[in-house]
Image (tube, rainbow, N blue to C red):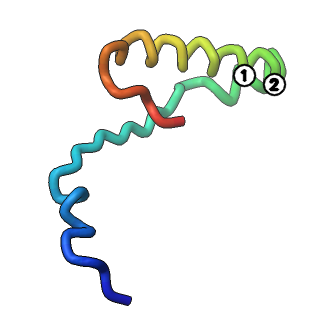
Amino acid sequence: MQESPGAGDAFESAVATVAFVDLAGFSAIADVYGDASAIAVLGHFEALVREALAGLAPPIK
């Protein structure tokens, strides 16, 4: 399959940042407090990340 001329040009200058985050003790939160509480912790974490990255491109979920 051939690409049209210049099709890959957009990717040559693209910048991306990827973060893999391990929330220590997260499984224990789910085990002790239940799934609803664990999901609430994730929601709080997401809010902190969004606040920290305010003014930048939004994080991809």
Q: Label 2: how many residues lie within 10 Å, few (<14), some (14-19) or many (20+)?
A: few
Q: Amino acid at mark 2?
A: Asp
* Element carrying mark 2: helix
Query: Going 49% across and 33% down the picture, which residue do you hit?
Result: 22
Residue 45 drawn at (x, y percent): 54, 17
* Element carrying mark 1: helix
- Quarter occupied by residue 15: top left
Q: Nearer the viewer, residue 4 or 53?
A: 4
**In the displayed structure, would residue 15 be above or below residue 36?**
below
Q: Nearer the viewer, residue 39 or 60?
A: 60
Q: Nearer the viewer, residue 17 or 8?
A: 8
Q: Nearer the viewer, residue 35 or 44?
A: 44
- Quarter occupied by residue 9: bottom left
What count of labels does the image hold?
2
Q: Which residue is mark 1?
A: 39
Q: Which residue is mark 2?
A: 35
**In the displayed structure, would residue 3 be above or below residue 36?**
below
The label number, if any, that marks residue 56 in the structure image: none
Query: Going 81% across and 15% down the picture, which residue do you hit?
Result: 33
The C terminus sits in image quarter: top right
Query: Going 41% across and 26% down the picture, which residue do you hit?
Result: 58
Asked if the residue at tag 2 contacts the one at tag 1, i.e. Cβ–Cβ closer than 8 Å, the answer is yes
Q: Amino acid at mark 1?
A: Ile
